[in-house]
Image: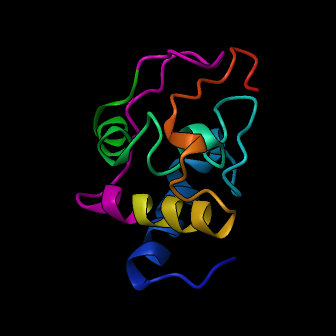
Amino acid sequence: MPTLTARAQAGRQAFETVCAGYHGVSLRGTDRGPPLLHPFYAPGSGHGDETFLSAMAGGAKSHHWKFGDMPKPEGLAVGTDKAIFDYIRALQAANGLAATEANTQGHRPRRDGS
């Protein structure tokens, strides 16, 4: 686990309560939602900062994975989305998912998640 800012630590707690049932406690996905530790979600990828925040605000239509639409997360306090976002980006960075040329070239996972 990387060292987290106070806001990212708050995001971790909110993520574990609201999001981990879908994306896994370690962001590696579950049978209900995709992994967020995937090049497709890395900084500079097709799912940039605003896409993450938009999905947390209102859900997202399924377009790459087999899990169906992402519902609007229930139970997020106002402002918690940015804390969760900081937590996700901190874990991505700690796992080598920083913006690179490889993950900015429109990589799209197959429907099976690879």
Q: How is the image coloured?
A: rainbow
Q: Main secondary structure of the magenta part?
A: loop
22 shown above or below 19: above
User: Viewer-proximal residue, 15 or 106?
Assistant: 106
In the image, farthest residue toward the front: 101
User: Viewer-proximal residue, 46 or 59?
Assistant: 46
Left or right placement of residue 105 versus residue 44 in this view: right
Q: Residue at x 70, y 40 (%)?
A: 29
- Which picture quadrant has residue 58? top left
User: Viewer-proximal residue, 79 or 96?
Assistant: 96
State yes or no: residue 74 in magenta.
Answer: yes
- Which picture quadrant has residue 51? top left
User: Viewer-proximal residue, 98 or 52?
Assistant: 98
86 shown above or below 40: below
Label count reads 0
- Which picture quadrant has residue 80? bottom left
Where is residue 88? Give x, y as percent. 52, 59
Q: Residue at x 49, y 18 (%)?
A: 69
Left or right placement of residue 74 versus residue 19 in this view: left
Where is residue 77? Give x, y as percent. 29, 58
Quadrant where the N terminus sits is bottom right
Where is residue 33? Give x, y as percent. 64, 32
Q: Residue at x 59, y 24 (%)?
A: 108
Q: Residue at x 50, y 16 (%)?
A: 62
84 shown above or below 52: below
In the image, farthest residue toward the left: 78
Quadrant where the C terminus sits is top right
Where is residue 15? Give x, y as percent. 52, 57
Left or right placement of residue 92 versus residue 63 in this view: right
Residue numbers of the magenta segment:
61-83
State yes or no: residue 65 in magenta.
Answer: yes
